[in-house]
Amino acid sequence: MAVKQSTPAGRVFDAVNILVLVALAVVMILPFIYVMAGSFARESELTERAFFLWPREFVTHSYDYIFATNTFLRSLVITVLVTAVGMGIQVLLTFTMAYPLSRRYLPGRSLFLGLVVFTLVFTGGLIPTYLIVRELGLLDSYWSLILPLAINPFFLIIVKNFFQELPDELQEAAQIDGCSELGVFWRIVLPLSKPILATMGLFYAVAIWNDFQSPLLYIDDASKWTLQMFVRQVTVSSDMANTVGQLDPNYEPPEQGLKFTVIVIATLPILLLYPFLQKHFVKGILIGSVKG
Amino acid sequence: MGKVRLRTRMVRYRWLFVLLLPGLAYFAVFRYAPMYGLTIAFQDYLPFLGFSGSPWVGLKHFEDLFSSPDFPRVLSNTLILALLNAVFVFPAPIVVALLLNELRLSVLKRAVQSAIYIPYFLSWTIVAALTYLLFALDVGPITQLMNDLFHARFDFLADPDWFRPLVILQTLWKSVGWWTIIYLAALAGVDPNLYEAARIDGANRWKQMWHVTLPGIRSTIIVVAILSAGNLLDTSFEQIYLLTNSLNRSVAEVFDTYVYFLGITQGSYSYSTAVGLFKAVVGVVLIYGVNWLARRFGHSGLS
């Protein structure tokens, strides 16, 4: 975009610009390398050296310890299951609702759309939602982590807009061939929607995986904690002994190393998904911003 | 006659309604029932009497809120964070996007972009965990660096003076990349011919940035400004909650955490709902206010 100019001032600017942006990128990445290195270091090295990006010696003590405790493993399994089931329900509900809303001939369509859009501007808020969840008997149930957030109105509108963009001819042709609305949705619309299905699935999965507010509000029972609660307890509250549980009273757990390790494990799935997230979410923003 | 037609249309499109129903049920139960639940802000809510049976008390909880010594403190904490966000966080991605736009090496450009979006996808728990590691008293790497540089003993996590800078640093780290993409997407839509024309007219790079690039993303900047204004009082609950401790509470308490502590930990459901409602109404007023202002100044605003 910029012009090829070779004035001295322009060259100085280019050099400074590269330096600034590379420094910015380093600041964003460095904490990851730091915790990664720390998670493979000996406990003694962590207390000796303030900062390092490469441990003197690679050991897996912290990983061995954390995976031997059943508390951590349990929260990991819970989080994986809640994320998988939750994502399935969220995608299902979002797509089944977005399709009728995308049909211009749906009776009452503008009313339904208005009701959805209003929730973007105004919500009942923390306490009334908490009371509803409690009234439904969902406190301390894994459903409380899924159902209150089952449809994100932003995502719903993005999917609705996507359906609206699909050529009407395909659907009309199918209907002439005797396909019902349900058949059109299942056989024509969904197969054409794989990219947006993947995008929404990723967005929802990351949101549940990262959710800290719901378990904080709705889950009291520590045996049902998700990974984010576990991470909070170990790193922010520094409540290692109670959270992790002592495996062997004669063996000192690698306190500092465990903090690094739980951060790495809770971050790893996101980092692995990152190439897909990046690709899809730029697309998602574009869909959302063009037809907001 | 209209009714008959509506009924035949409903029968004809019955499958659409079947598909619509689960979603509508969700919105009714988890989005609109809580809005109805806001009525408890005007009641003394008793769990066994429910939303509809609890006694009405009018504006009592709002009067309590406005006369409470907590109110000026929580309001100013929230507004100061909002102001700091507007000054430091809002312009940062615009600057980064403009700098990236001037970067000629497209490989480097892509690498920098990839690096700066990553933190956006991490949870606040992880961001808080990293903060607690990096800024830990005496042992955190940043703490040690600062201690050596200034020959002092910094206590970033407990010292109330450091709470706000930490919040802003966290927000910058986590969200600059995300907003940068939005501006870059807008920049991609700027007509290259405009640069060509500006160059023929003798505009240097600085002038091109000022007269072509910035106007090209002006409408995006305004939309982001309107949306941020609506969220002015929406400090991120998770972020603030995770960074709050007994030592920095005086500066840390904002509306969201105040509602949580009073409602969930102390059980003052009606009072905390009134606080939440006050905050939500201010948010709606702000979003429409800024939208109205944007229109008055000749921009198209949100819609």
Image: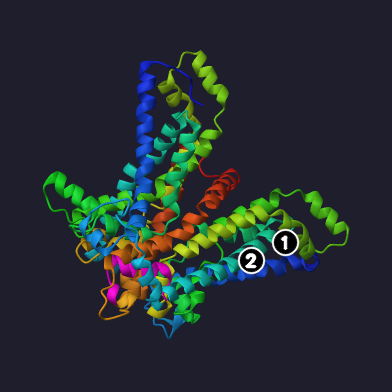
Q: Residue furthest bottom?
A: B48
Q: Residue furthest front?
A: A57
Q: Which mark is residue A62?
A: none
Q: Residue at x 35, y 72 (%)?
A: A65
Q: Residue at x 46, y 66 (%)?
A: A124
Q: In the rendered structure, which amino acid carries the disc numbered 2? A: Leu
Mark 1 lies on a secondary structure that is loop
Q: Residue at x 52, y 22 (%)?
A: B195
Above/below status of A211 relative to A160: below
Left or right relative to A263: residue B13: right
Left or right relative to A41: residue A279: right
Above/below status of B11 relative to A190: below
Quadrant that contains the C terminus of chain B: top right
| Disc 1 target residue | A107
Q: Answer whether residue A156 is visible to the viewer in this image.
A: yes
The overriding secondary structure of the stretch rendered in magenta is helix
Residue A153 drawn at (x, y percent): 56, 59
Q: Residues within 10 Å of mark 1 (few under 14, many from 20)?
A: some
| Disc 2 target residue | A92
Q: Residue at x 77, y 57 (%)?
A: A188
Q: Answer whether residue B258 is visible to the viewer in this image.
A: no
Residue B188 drawn at (x, y percent): 54, 34
Mark 2 lies on a secondary structure that is helix
Reading the chain from its start, which is encountered first: label 2 or label 1?
A: 2
Q: Residues within 10 Å of mark 2 (few under 14, many from 20)?
A: some
Foreground of the two, A158 or B173:
B173
What residue span does the magenta drawing correspond to? Answer: A225-241
Res B98 quadrant in image: top left
